[in-house]
Amino acid sequence: MSVNRPIWLESVATRVETRLSEFLKDEQDRWSSLDTDLNAPLGELTRLVAAGGKRLRPAFCYLAFVGVGGDENSEQLLDTQAALELLHASALLHDDIIDGSLTRRGEPTSHTRYISKHSDSKWAGEARRFGEGAVILIGDLAFVYADQLMTGVNPMTAKVWNEMRIEVNIGQYLDLLGSAQRERDLNKAERVCRYKSGKYTVERPLHLGASLAAPERADVLLEQLSNFGLPLGDAFQMRDDVLGAFGDTSTNLTGKPIGDDLREGKPTPLLAMAFERATAAQREVLDQVGAPQVSRQSISDIQQVIIETGALEALESKISILVEQSMTAIRKSSLNEVAVTRLIELAEFVASRKN
C-alpha cells in the first residue's frame, strides 16, 4: 500500500525550487550575454531541474538540520539543499547516457533531445556523438554548480560532501560493470544498490544537514543518522528496482518504460534473488535479462519468473524490515520530536512510492 506524499514536503520543495530557479536564471543570463548559443544548454539544465522530482534529498537534509537545532531560514541550508538537487541532476544526465534511456519522467531524455536537434538542423558530424557529448558537458556543469553552492561550508560538511560525490561515482561504475558482467551475486547487487543511490539519497543528505547545523556534535549525530539512513536508503533503491522491473502497471507513473531495468541488465537485488531461487528452466528465461533487443514478450516472461520464484515477495519483505529498522533507529536518536515524526513519515513514503 502506497503512502501519500507528506503535506509539509511541499513547502520544503518550493523554497528549494525558487532558489534553483534564481540561481540558474542568473547563470543563463550571464553566459547568454557572452554567446546566445549558451541559452540552450543552460535552458536544458533548468528544464530538467524544474521538471519535477520528489525533492527527497533536500527534505532529508532539512530535517536533520532543524532536528539538531538549526535555523530553518539559514541561507547556507538552502544553498546546500539546492546543491543536492544539482548533483542529482548531474547524475541523472550522465546515467541516462550510460543506460541509453530514451525517456525520463515521461519525456525525452536530454541527450535524445540534443540528438534530434542535431539531426533536424542537419549539422555536420554524427548526431549521437553530438547529443551525448553536449549532455555530458551539461551534467558536468551541474556538478560544478553544485560545488559552487557549497562554498563556505564548515570543514566537516565539506568532508561529507566530498565523500558523497566520490560514492556516487563509485556506485555508478559498479552498476555499469555489473550490467556488463551480468552480475547476479546478491552481496554485490546490494553493494551497488547502496552506493549507486541509497547513500546519496538518504544518509549523506542527513549528514550534510546535521554537520552544517552542529559540526561540534557530528561524530555522535552522523552515527545516529547512519543507523536510520543506511537501511532506508537501501529500501529506497530496492523500491526503485521493483519499479524499474515492473513499473506501476495500473497508471505507469514511473515515466520510464516498464521493464527498463530488465532490458538494461541492471545488477539488482531483485534479480539476484530470482536467480538464487530459480530452477534450471527458469534461469534460461532469466538469462534473457540484458540481452540485445529483448522482446516485450520476453520481458513479460522474465517478470513472471521473478514472481514465481518468490523473489518479488522476498524483496518486499526485506524492504519492510529495512524500513522498520530505520524507524527504530531514528526514535532512539537525539533529534527533536518534530523532526523524528517527519522522518518517519518520509520513510513510509519513500519505501511505498509508486514512482
Image (spheres, rainbow, N blue to C red):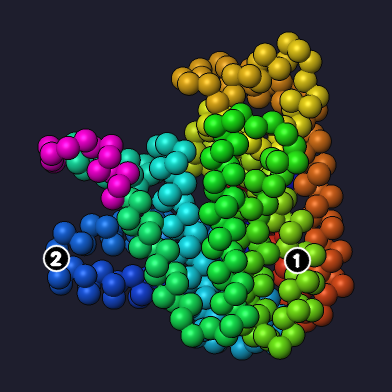
Residue 251 has which mark? Answer: none
- In percent of the image, x 54 and y 40: which residue is there? 176
Residue 103, horizontal then vertical, whole percent: 42, 40
Q: Quadrant of the N terminus?
A: top right
Mark 1 lies on residue = 226
Q: Amino acid at mark 2?
A: Asp
Q: Is residue 96 visible?
A: yes
Residue 182, horizontal then vertical, whole percent: 61, 29
Residue 331 magenta = no
- Mark 1–mark 2 distance (CA, rounded to whole Å): 46 Å
Frontmost residue, 150 versus 252: 150
Residue 131 magenta = yes
- Is mark 1 in CB contact (under 8 Å) with mark 2? no
Give the side of residue 80 with respect to residue 132, left or right: right
- In percent of the image, x 75 and y 70: which residue is there? 225
- In percent of the image, x 14 and y 63: which residue is there? 36
Residue 181, horizontal then vertical, whole percent: 59, 30
Mark 2 lies on residue = 35
Give the side of residue 306 with respect to residue 146, left or right: right
Dot 1: within a 10 Å radius of its alpha carbon, few (fewer than 14), some, or many (20 or more) residues?
many
71 to 55, vertically: above or below: below
User: Which residue lies most toward the top here?
Assistant: 281
Residue 71: image quadrant is: bottom right
Q: Provide the residue span drawn in magenta.
A: 121-134
Dot placed on the residue nearer the N-terminal end, 1 or 2: 2
Residue 227, horizontal then vertical, whole percent: 80, 65
168 to 300, vertically: above or below: below
Residue 106: image quadrant is: top left
| Secondary structure of the residue carrying numbered label 2 | loop
Q: Amino acid at mark 1?
A: Ser
| Number of numbered discs overlaid on the protein picture | 2
